[in-house]
Image (cartoon, rainbow, N blue to C red):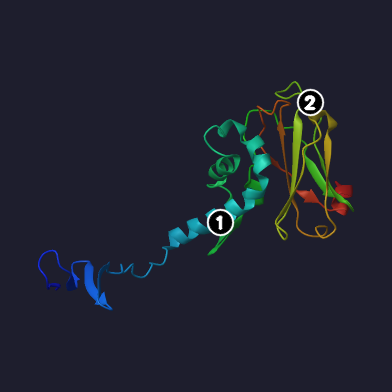
Amino acid sequence: MGIIEQGINGPFKGKAGSVVGSSWKKINYIKGLRRDKGLKRPPTSEQAVQRQKFKLLNTFFIPLKTVLNAGFRSFTEKSTGVNSAFRYNYDHAFTTDGDNISLDYAALKFSHGSLCTAGAEQAWLDNGGIHVTWNPKTYGMGGEVDDISYAIAYSPKFHMFFVNSKENRQAGSARIDLPSKIRGTEIHAWLFFADKQRKRVSKTVYVPVSTPDLALQS
């Protein structure tokens, strides 16, 4: 309880609700009580899973802002390409093994649209990078000869992306150069197309990467 010593307009000492009156070196002052925020509750198992998924997917997509702005162009009027990709992939982009959650690389999509994919997609490693090939004769079937290819490679070990967006559909292939430290590690590859105006895009195709020996046997 606070005590008013000099009338209603005078200083007081003690506690009045959430306010404390006191003095120091003949100076009267009041201060508010510190709020006790209490201990933070640990997240539920469901919340922990959601947070882990959010971190995995967000960390994965952030380096690809330019590619995702192209791949999800029709969704970017009210959202960024990264946010659009996050929402589109969240429900199917993970594999679960007990408490361990990881990205399902084959299920990840970097684009979504009605433009025709190519078919017959293949990818293999050579000494300096990755060759990605596709059927070049799909123009006139929902695509055009000058559609631009987006060939994407990713190294999980180094969390590094490599993109070739210079080749057109009719070329039938694209090469992605890799630094020496990447070679011999796990690599994933994807392919999608955009029209020359970059207004329409195809869906993304996951392309398994073969070693040179496997490529020669196929």
Q: Residue 72: image x %, image y %?
A: 61, 36
User: Vertical placement of 158 versus 142: above or below?
Assistant: below
For the point 86% across and 48% down, which residue is it? 215
Identify the image quadrant of the N terminus.
Answer: bottom left
Instruction: Say which quarter of the image contains residue 4.
Output: bottom left
Q: Residue furthest toward the top?
A: 140
Q: Residue at x 80, y 45 (%)?
A: 123
Residue plotted at (72% across, 33% down): 193
Local secondary structure at mark 2:
loop
Q: Is residue 84 left or right of residue 199?
A: left
Pointer 1: residues within 10 angstroms few (<14), some, or many (20+)?
few
The one of 120 and 29 positioned closer to us in this rendering:
29
Of callouts 2 and 1, which one flags the residue occurring earlier in the amino acid sequence? 1
Q: Which mark is residue 121?
A: none
Q: CA distance from mark 2 to mark 1?
A: 37 Å
Q: Which mark is residue 55?
A: 1
Residue 202: name its quadrant: top right
Which element carries disc 1, helix, strand or loop? helix
**Which amino acid, by three-letter code, is at mark 1?**
Lys
* Tag 2 residue: 146
